[in-house]
Amino acid sequence: MRTQFSRHLVCPQHTDKQVRLSLESLQGKDNECVEGFLKCDTCQTLYPIVEGVAIVVKDFVASRQAKDDRYEEGGALFVPYRWVQYDHSSEDRLLSTLKWRLKPNEFYNRIVHTISLKTDGVALDMGCSMGYSTLELAKKYAFVVGIDLSFSFIKEARRRLSTSQQENVEFCVADSLHAPFNYMKFDLILALNLLELVQPTDLLSSIHWLLKPHSLVVFADPYDYNYQPHAKQRVDAQTFRSMVEKTGFELVQKTKTESHIPWIIKIHERAYLFYFVDYIMAKKLSKHKA
């Protein structure tokens, strides 16, 4: 973790989210903290930094117990997500047979392409996975943060960040519903493929808290609950749009109708998932929910 990133972080234990964390570095080099702690001087909570990855979650023990190991290295979805974002090849058996030369990460490219340049803006990529969309978004914004609950995803994202040599990006392990950032910090929030993992109403509330007035949020989701059969609140394209409008947001005109963006995930050599992903862009109306 870059040492200056600590200035952006606040303690998620406090509902006002205004208590900044201090950095206690145990091992570091230049401007990097490799091992250490982030500390809240108000409640004395310590958040570990492991292998350069800051873990800033509200309840570390509970998060470990609830952690979905499929997204960790060695889990069922770690390699498929790495393939989608970075490791696919045009020689892949399925991709080479498609009539249209579809790149799996084109889904991310198309989403980021719809976002206007804001060279003084600060953006958040919720559920950033291995950081492909975060790094692309950083080409348009002054500073971008990527968060995910998977330590392995964030570790891989930081490795890709090192390779890209982009200076305006940082990643940490954090919960999208209890993100460790100040009220109204962000000019844009990206929330891709999260609706089956969290309560949509809770996600909308968190995003509304973090966004500046009249700023944008972008959602993209296939509404697939096959991997999360016990999800408490299932939504489809129309019900989610209705929820967005009832939570203090206004839909951008061109996303009021359902969209179908193709996306492929390779599970293993003989199995792929092909999705049509919906895309929604909305603007926060004011400081308070409608």
Image: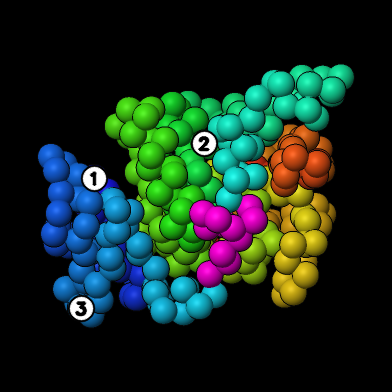
Q: Amino acid at mark 1?
A: Arg
Q: How many residues crowd mark 3 within 10 Å: few (<14), some (14–19), many (20+)?
A: few
**What residue is rendered at 20% in x and 78% in y?**
44
Amino acid type assigned to the residue bearing label 3 in the image: Gln
Compare residues 279 and 252 and report the one nearer the observer: 279
Q: Residue 48: percent from the left, percent from the top?
A: 28, 65
**Magenta stretch mostly in which secondary structure?**
loop
> How far across and how far down the image is residue 33, in percent?
20, 50
> What secondary structure is found at the residue carrying circle 3?
loop
- Residue 75, magenta (yes or no): yes
Magenta region includes residue 227: no
Question: Quick check: can you spot residue 67?
Answer: yes
Task: Give the vertical position of 122 relative to 245 (above or below).
Answer: above
Is 54 left, or right, of 152 in this rendering?
left
Above or below residue 243? Residue 61 is: below
Please name the amino acid that badge 2 sits on: Tyr
Residue 132: assigned label: 2
Q: Quadrant of residue 141?
A: top left
Q: Which residue is mark 3?
A: 44
Extent of the magenta region = 67-77
Q: Nearer the viewer, mark 2 or mark 3?
A: 2
Disc on the earlier residue, 1 or 3? 1
| Identity of the residue drawn at 59% across and 58% down | 75
Q: Which residue is mark 1?
A: 2
Q: How many marks?
A: 3
